[in-house]
């Protein structure tokens, strides 16, 4: 039965062949059975302190915790029978004895494992008639994490994350028994650049995000799988939006990129999406102009500048589809000076990447060159500029050396034609992250219904310049067209890129 | 590894080295070593002492902090010259520990966890110290005093300097 390092066991009557060395929780997961658990996490060490994953192993007298029981050949596991259910009900009763039951004012409500398991495995009533233990609430652990000691079930996931993954060893448990409480080193403020992951790890409402708390009940929100665009890592995330405003980002599991984690910088990198100062209509000559008017003006500006030369500067925050649309416009105009701006910063060994924009590789794929450190003093007839986010800008003297300007920007930018940008949560598209991975961004909201995405705007401009050109109707079709044309993308489809991304199919020097 | 740079006395480091030989992992010797360390550092663990201990053992300081917090024998606040631990668990309670606690509160002006004004002793209520046959009892530093009465307690505490 056992071969190639696999073992065969029976879980709730289902036969499962799983890799040797995994635990009962993981084995059950592989056959679609969820064993409830709080303290266990696949990437953290096993401590076995919550006791809620108790399972019956036939032939073993006591119930065993699924997290710390490794699979064996011929093992027979029951995760749901009467004995297990009774025991689990008991564990839930203990966990809830001192719990404040303040779900109505708790930010975790709706995505709380304590709520879920109380419904699934609890008895629904309490037999505890005495005063509940009192502990401090609303403790600030710095400007990102807020701690509520009464809600904490002492699973130590946060302690282990900071020890084992982030490496800052900042939290410990003080006292013991019912007095046990988490403490943070020194002045009680966390320092790790990955500290907000403990908010996701916390199975209950003990750790909440200062950025997100009380903004919205999660069941009113829309969740869109996309990627983080704060740096070239492209951590996979779920973007939470409500009423067409972005409210939070949490990491989404991708073993090839970010595992279960993301940096705080990436998580908090979205304020510009909701910026009230964003422009929602193009301007031509400083006056509001509908898209057709602004685009014919842009056409006139750019065609008039052909002889004197045009400088095109792309942004490394653009999607591949937009970059290829911009490339089409440049081709139609015969633009030779094609650059892109890439902000650089500090990186680390875990997830933070020194390139502070998501798609420098896509820019290179579309034929844009890295912006020089020293711009030449060459003068241009016109500038076609897609302005990146706040971190980097084209030097003012370079802009001044261009007679006319067509600028795409999020907020108002003085120019002959100013076209609004959209952010990455407002459109579908692909980007090329570190490690040459093609990953999808997906539309989760619309900032204003009047806005067109850059790809559509650039394709329309392209059609004005070359009436024979027809843009793709959707980002998916644009990607397909791009994949057909470009050897590095050959064979990839929107679906094969999917939720977890795919490698560029041949190693191109894009880094 | 940290022998030469250790902030502790060479005698203490030598004793800890002996302790390490008894266990498969250094970490296993943490608690006996911490008793020695606490004695060398005025009877309590300051943040600095916690950090020095962690450095000696190559552990995260928050791990040592957790051990200090867990065990009542370790102190995270400064203590008096002596530590008086009065048992308040079942047998002692039935034999009058509550009265003795009240007596200490009134006579010496210290409640649970407090230190006398002259810094002579820190008074602590304690869970079972294992001398139920001679209840009530107390531990003064490492010395036990059995079959306590208020008078006996006063003579012991009065003799402390």
Image (cartoon, coloured by chain):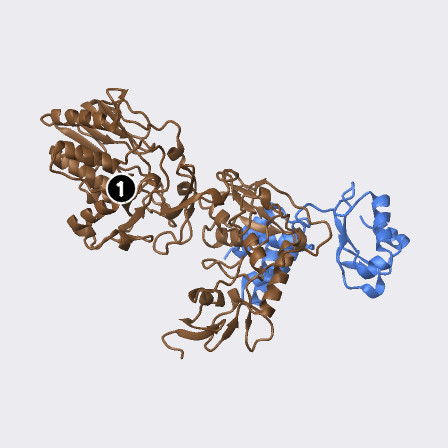
Q: Quadrant of the N terminus of chain A?
A: bottom left
| Image quadrant in which you'd find residue A95 | bottom right
- Place of residue A375 in the rendered image (x, y in percent of width and height, measured from the top left): 20, 30
- Place of residue A391 in the rendered image (x, y in percent of width and height, measured from the top left): 33, 33
Which color is chain A depicted in?
A: brown
Along the viewing direction, whichever of A69 and A97 lies nearer the viewer? A97
Which color is chain B depicted in?
A: blue
- Place of residue A509 in the rendered image (x, y in percent of width and height, measured from the top left): 20, 49
Residue under circle 1?
A: A319
Q: Using residue A322 as the reference point, say whether residue A306 is left or right of it.
A: left
- Place of residue B19 in the rendered image (x, y in percent of width and height, measured from the top left): 60, 64
What is the crowding at mark 1: few (fewer than 14 residues within 10 Å), some, or many (at least 20)? Answer: many
Query: Taking the image as drawn, is residue A369 in sight?
Result: no
Along the viewing direction, whichever of A90 and A123 lies nearer the viewer? A123
**Mark 1, secondary structure of its residue:** loop
Along the viewing direction, whichever of B10 and A257 lies nearer the viewer? A257
Q: Using residue A455 as the reference point, say whether residue B127 is left or right of it.
A: right
Q: For the point 64% across and 43% down, which residue is it?
A: A136
- Residue A410 vs A265, above or below: the answer is above
């Amino acid at each position: 039965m056992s071969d190639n390092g696999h073992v065969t066991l029976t879980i709730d009557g289902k036969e499962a062949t799983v890799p040797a060395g995994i635990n009962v929780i993981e084995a059950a997961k592989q056959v679609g059975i969820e064993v409830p658990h709080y303290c266990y996490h696949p990437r953290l060490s096993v401590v076995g302190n919550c006791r809620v994953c108790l399972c019956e192993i036939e032939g073993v007298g006591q119930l065993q915790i699924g997290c710390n029981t490794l699979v064996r050949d011929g093992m027979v596991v029951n995760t749901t029978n009467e004995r297990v259910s009774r025991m689990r009900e008991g564990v839930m009763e203990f966990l809830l004895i001192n719990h404040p039951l303040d779900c109505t004012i708790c930010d975790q409500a709706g995505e709380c494992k304590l709520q879920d398991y109380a419904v699934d495995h609890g008895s629904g009533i309490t037999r505890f008639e005495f005063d509940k233990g009192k502990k401090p609430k609303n403790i600030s652990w710095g400007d990102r994490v807020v701690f509520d000691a009464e809600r904490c079930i002492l699973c130590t996931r946060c302690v282990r994350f900071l020890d084992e993954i982030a490496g800052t060893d900042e939290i410990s448990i003080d006292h013991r028994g019912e007095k046990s409480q988490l403490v943070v080193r020194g002045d009680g403020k966390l320092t790790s650049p990955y500290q907000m992951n403990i908010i996701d790890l916390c199975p209950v409402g003990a750790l909440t995000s200062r950025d997100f708390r009380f903004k919205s009940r999660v069941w009113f929100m829309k969740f869109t799988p996309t990627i983080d665009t704060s740096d070239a890592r492209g951590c996979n995330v779920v973007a939470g939006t409500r009423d067409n405003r972005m409210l939070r980002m949490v990491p989404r599991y991708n073993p090839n990129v970010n595992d279960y984690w993301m940096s705080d910088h990436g998580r908090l990198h979205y304020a510009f999406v909701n910026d009230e100062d964003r422009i929602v209509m193009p301007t031509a000559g400083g006056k509001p102009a509908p898209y057709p008017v602004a685009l014919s003006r842009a056409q006139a500006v750019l065609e008039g500048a052909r002889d004197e030369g045009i400088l095109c500067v792309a942004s490394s925050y653009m999607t591949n589809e937009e970059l290829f649309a911009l490339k089409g416009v440049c081709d139609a105009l015969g633009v030779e000076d094609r650059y892109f701006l890439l902000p650089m910063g500090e990186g680390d060994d875990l997830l933070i990447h020194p390139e502070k924009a998501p798609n420098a590789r896509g820019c290179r794929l579309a034929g844009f060159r890295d912006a020089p450190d020293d711009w030449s003093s060459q003068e241009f007839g016109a500038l076609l500029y897609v302005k990146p986010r706040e971190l980097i800008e084209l030097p003012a003297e370079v802009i001044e050396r261009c007679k006319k300007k067509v600028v795409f920007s999020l907020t108002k930018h003085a120019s002959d034609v100013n076209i609004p940008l959209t952010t990455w949560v407002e459109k579908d598209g692909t980007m090329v992250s570190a490690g040459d991975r093609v990953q999808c961004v997906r539309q989760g909201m619309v900032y204003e219904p009047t806005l067109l995405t850059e790809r559509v705007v650039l394709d329309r401009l392209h059609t004005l310049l070359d009436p024979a050109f027809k843009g793709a109707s959707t980002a998916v079709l644009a990607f397909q067209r791009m994949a057909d044309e470009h050897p590095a993308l050959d064979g990839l489809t929107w679906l094969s890129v999917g939720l977890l991304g795919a490698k560029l199919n041949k190693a191109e020097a894009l880094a | 590894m940290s022998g030469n740079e250790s902030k502790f006395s060479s005698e203490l480091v030598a004793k800890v080295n002996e302790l390490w030989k008894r266990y498969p992992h250094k970490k296993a010797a943490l608690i006996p070593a911490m008793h020695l360390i606490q004695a060398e550092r005025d009877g309590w663990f300051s943040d600095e002492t916690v950090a020095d201990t962690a450095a000696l053992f190559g552990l995260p300081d928050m791990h040592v902090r957790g051990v200090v917090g867990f065990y009542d024998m370790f102190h995270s606040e400064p203590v008096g010259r002596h530590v008086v631990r009065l048992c308040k668990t079942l047998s002692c309670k039935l034999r009058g520990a509550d009265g003795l606690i009240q007596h200490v509160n009134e006579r010496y002006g210290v409640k649970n966890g407090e230190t006398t004004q002259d810094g002579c002793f820190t008074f602590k209520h304690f869970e079972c110290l294992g001398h139920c046959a001679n209840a009530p009892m107390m531990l003064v530093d490492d010395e036990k005093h059995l079959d306590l009465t208020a008078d006996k307690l006063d003579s012991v505490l009065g003799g402390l300097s």
